[in-house]
Image (cartoon, rainbow, N blue to C red):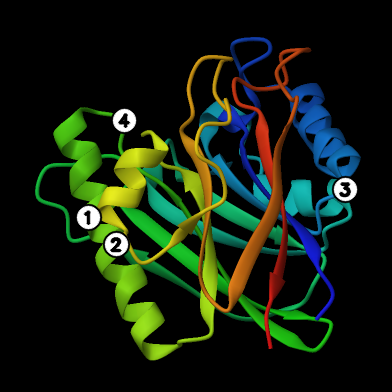
Amino acid sequence: MKTFLLGSFNICSAHWREGHYTDQNLSMIADKIRESGVDVCALQEVDRGAARSDGVDMPARLSDMSGLHHHYFIKIRDFQGGEYGTAILSRFPITAAETLNFDVKLAKQGTSCGYVVLDADGTPVTVWNTHLSVESEDANTDTLTCLSDILRRSLDAHPEGFFCCGDFNTVPAKVASYIPFVRLSHDGLITYSDKASIDHILSAGKCRTADPRVFDTQYDGTTDHHMLICRVRVDD
């Protein structure tokens, strides 16, 4: 198959620049997605219908504004009259999708993940997205362990593999320790506030990443994360 660009992008619910939601900030986020050239973008900190973001359906709006016209929302929890979670935007059609809740013991945040199956010019490609707990080290480990169990079952059932994006709120070494059957796309790119390496794109099976890099989305206050981008492919 041809390669395509996959991004992971924490958008801080479009309220980082002004300290509260604005349509301008949401438009800036869409601009960054377009400028990055990604074909698929996994978003974290996404509101849908929440009061703090004026009831906006962020996945739908960003899908329209970015030109990635297929989208799927992954709910983490109910929030301010709406929902809060993650989302996946795609240039490719989505043929299947599912949200899975974690069987957590400690964590109250970051308690779900989800996936889409894309028809990438005739090749089925599975992309997961998640946002793990930042409450404490133990809570983060709780969500990371749950994600590992889910991804292990996915790979056992579908050996062709997957990509998994997200804000893991932890460093590459911990991710590698708890999910040893995946390949990390990078081992230390700075993705958060110019000081931390917490956003990751993982691959497993026949799915491969190359050329990891960060796209600067912090310089003008669009959000507090850089977008992480990789060129990806699925081997025959």
Q: Secondary structure at mark 1?
A: helix
Mark toward the start of the polypeptide (2 vs 4): 4
Residue that carries the numbered disc 2 in the rendered image: 148
- Quadrant where the N terminus sits is bottom right
**Residue 122 picture location, percent across and down:** 80, 89
Q: Residues within 10 Å of mark 4 (few under 14, many from 20)?
A: some
Q: Secondary structure at mark 3?
A: loop
Left or right: residue 148 versus residue 56 is left
Inspect the image, locate mark 2, and give the three-letter code of the amino acid beneath it.
Answer: Ser
Task: Relative to 87, say whether 33 is above or below.
Answer: above
Residue 134 is marked as: 4
Q: Residue at x 85, y 48 (%)?
A: 66
Residue that carries the numbered disc 1 in the rendered image: 145
Mark toward the start of the polypeptide (1 vs 3): 3
Look at the numbered discs 1 and 2 and tell me whether their residues touch, using CB distance below 8 Å: yes
Mark toward the start of the polypeptide (4 vs 3): 3
Q: Residue at x 29, y 62 (%)?
A: 148
